Each structure stands twice: as structure tokens, then as C-alpha cells.
Amino acid sequence: MEDIVVWPSGALRRGTDNQAEIYRTRGGSAANVAAFAAGLHPTRFIGCVGDDATGENLGRVLSESGVDVRVQRRGTTGTIVILIEPDGERTMLPNRGAATKLERVADAWLDGVELLHIPAYSFDGDPVRQSVEAMIDVVRGRGGLISVDASSTQVIETFGVQRFRDYLERIAPDFLIANGDEAELLGFGSADATAENLRRNPSTTFVLKAGAQPTRVLSAHAEPLTVDVPPVTVIRDSTGAGDAFAAGFLTTYLTSRDLVASCRGGHRSAQAVLGSPGATTPIPVVGASTPGAPAPSARTKQ
């Protein structure tokens, strides 16, 4: 997907112009994870982009990041408008477009996959959900690991909170990664509810982030872990920090099988994106030369 990241110069004023810096970047949760992970471990992206110049260029940018890109192409590439507040918090306005249209992929696309990472966005509608479920079966059948990112409170609420919990029990990922709001929505708001969650999900390790507060790692068969987050001096844009954390956590886990080291790897990756627009560092140019693609300069003042 393409991210259109808007950095207003101050608080938004309704009914008039607002000065802003605007950036067009490669985005999409799964693509972000793949891009951040590619410098740490061999990485493949599987998805669907539009049959358009934007989709072609987004795939090229991802490939140039070192990712093995396997995509289907149909429809129109999805777009997310992201409004960034002065403290770095973001509000996202997505139109997922072709991202929801992924159909079942050839099993050969999953050859060599040690771990399949899935944003919960992929559970929100068919055919993409059916395609992802088929991939889970193939990877798990070959001995691979499954990771799910809770993605967004809106996704969980739209899916249905209890239905989402039941769905997680059914697919039983090896890892569930969530931020504080998502974790609370999923039932980690009290000790009793947390214990019940762990009882109902005996094979899942829950990795619960809380911004600058310590990351918790919980599972039914191990003592809880708490890993401090190093201080950050500059936070301008939190877009993609969760995806970068997932990339750092999962790639470190694949090479170390150490959960504390994995959290630290996630923290390092997340901190690298907090000063740049969107899920990037440095600013990328999306579609420099293809007619109809975004302009060569990814940065526009308005």
C-alpha cells in the first residue's frame, strides 16, 4: 500500500488551510515488517497490489530493500492517509484496495519459510482471510512458526472482540504481538483476565508493548518477562514503529530463540523509525520514473 503521511505544522484548524509537510512512502503493515526485517534475515513478502503504476513502483521499492517480493496484481493499489500529531501519534484513514484481494497462493511461494507473520488486517474480509488461513496450514505443516500482529483496535472491534479472541484460539499463533490498547481490548486488563487468556491459548506467547513502558512477554508455560524500553530523545512520527518492532523481535528470535534478546531487537528497530515520516528511514522515493507514478520528490510542502 501507499502511505500519504501528513505532518501539520500545528494543531489542525477546521474550515481553512493548514500548513503541512506531505510525504508519499511505501507502506502497508506486512510490507513494512518485510522491509525492516530484510536487513536482518532473508525475507519474503506475499501480497496483492493494484494493476497500476503505483503498485508496480511499490513492489520495486520493496524489492530494492532486499525483500523477495511475490505479489498478485489486480484492482487499485490501496492508500492510507496518515495524520501525524506534534507528539508523533498518528491517525490513519485507510482504503485498502487491492490488499484485500489476495487469492490463494501457490504452495511454492512458501518454500523455505521459517516464520509467517500476519497483520490482523488480513483477517478482515475475504478472499484475503481464506488465503492467509491456507498459508498458515502450509507453513505450520512444514514446521514453521506463525506470528500475528493485532494491528489496530478498530480492526478488532470491526471483527468483533469476542469473535477475534475465538479466532485467535482457533488459529493458535506461536506469537501474538499487541500494543497497550489492543492488549486491553483482548482481555489483558487484569490479572484474572490475563490468566484466563493464557489458559485458553496454551501454545501462544503474547508480546505486549506499552510505548515507553516495559514490554511484557506472557505465556502459559513460562514465567512472565518484562523488558525495559531504552529512552528515546526524538519522536516525530510513530508510524511503522510497531511493524519495525515486529521485524526486530521476530528476526532476533529466529536466530537466538531468546525472548529477552528478541524484545531488545524489537526496541532497536522501532526506535530507528521514530524521527522520519511514515514507516521509513531514510525518506524513500516511491516511483521516480514510471509515468503515472508518484513524483520523484517524496516530500511536498503545502
Image (cartoon, helix red, strand yellow):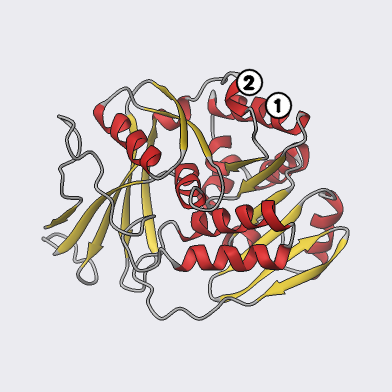
Q: Which residue is mark 2?
A: 107
**150 and 70: which one is in front?**
70
Q: For the C terminus, which image quadrant?
A: bottom left
Q: Which residue is mark 1?
A: 138
Say few, some or many: other residues with alpha carbon within 10 Å of mark 2 (under 14 / 14 to 19 / 20 or more). Answer: few
Relative side of 48 to 133, left or right = left
Q: Measured from the top left, where is residue 265 in percent x and y?
A: 59, 64
Q: Is residue 198 above or below residue 164?
A: below
Q: Is residue 1 visible?
A: no
Say few, some or many: other residues with alpha carbon within 10 Å of mark 1 (under 14 / 14 to 19 / 20 or more). Answer: some
Indicate the secondary structure of the residue bearing disc 2: helix
Q: Which amino acid type is marked by label 2? A: Asp
Residue at position x 85%, y 50% from top? 202
Q: Measured from the top left, where is residue 68 in percent x and y?
A: 48, 35
Name the quadrant containing residue 227: bottom right
Name the quadrant containing residue 300: bottom left
Q: Is residue 41 above or below residue 179?
A: above
- Whether tag 2 and tag 1 are in contact, CB under 8 A, the answer is yes
Q: Is residue 171 above or below residue 251?
A: above
Relative side of 142 to 241, left or right = right
Name the quadrant containing residue 7: bottom left
Q: In 3D space, how far apart are the residues under numbered discs 2 and 1 (Cα atoms)?
A: 7 Å
